[in-house]
Amino acid sequence: MTQTVDLWFDPLCPWAWITSRWLLEVEQVRDIEAAFHCMSLAVLNAGREGLDPDYKRRMETEAWYGARASIAVELKYGPAVLRDFYTALGTRYHLRQEPRTPETVRAALADLGLDEAIADATVTTEYDAALTKSHHEGMDPVGFEVGTPVVRINGKSLFGPVISPAPKGEAAGRLFDGLALVTEYDGFFELKRTRTVGPIFD
């Protein structure tokens, strides 16, 4: 029986992008289906004190565009098309290093033949209630000390895995097996070490 594995992502986050590519790889070697959902770093960081000024600026501008567009695509076209849109936008954001602007969002929409007017809504609050609802569905079970990615396996939500680069083939499957295993223990909370590399996209 195919197992659904849920991922909450913000398109701005390179770590969520790598985790999403890993889950697509896992689909090839394990009987799972990855379901993508929207969270928002802008919502998560709203009102937080002590943020780096440049990061705060990005949270107040760039973080909204992709997240608002993603929830709009999900509402208008459904979760399968959201998955495709995330791939289109993430490719532009992370692989091509295009600017995080409504114009880049519009180009990603055009890649898939979707309604380009969604890009205009990314500078409004039209979709913020729906985005916040999706955000809380992903974040409430895991807590607010973390960000994205959030993965839900076996009904248990965890932050991560934060990986770089994404493993391929059976190595991807084995990492998934390990993550699934720790979700079986209710008392498991955290594993962590200092990152020694940045995001590696391949």
Image (spheres, rainbow, N blue to C red):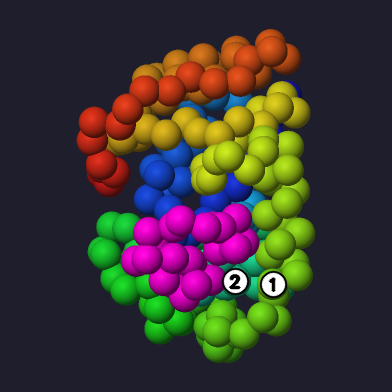
> What's the amino acid at mark 2?
Arg
Q: Quadrant of the C terminus?
A: top left
Q: Position of residue 109 (x, y in %)?
A: 49, 76
Asked whether 61 or 200 is in front, the reply is: 61
Residue 30 appears left or right of 126: left
Asked whether 77 or 66 is in front, the reply is: 66
Asked which quadrant contains residue 159, the reply is top right
* Residue at numbered disc 1: 128
Going from the N terminus, do you reach mark 1 or mark 2 first? Answer: 2
Location of residue 192 with respect to 58 vertically, above or below: above
Q: Position of residue 171 (x, y in %)?
A: 37, 20
**Residue furthest to the front:** 50
Q: Residue at x 63, y 15 (%)?
A: 188
Q: Which residues are magenta?
A: 40-64
* Residue at numbered disc 2: 68
Q: Residue at x 60, y 71 (%)?
A: 68
What number is the disc on residue 159?
Answer: none
> Crowdedness of circle 2 by 10 Å Cα count: few (<14), some, many (20+)?
many
Label 1, secondary structure: give it.
helix
Asked which quadrant contains residue 44, the reply is bottom right
Asked which quadrant contains residue 186, the reply is top right
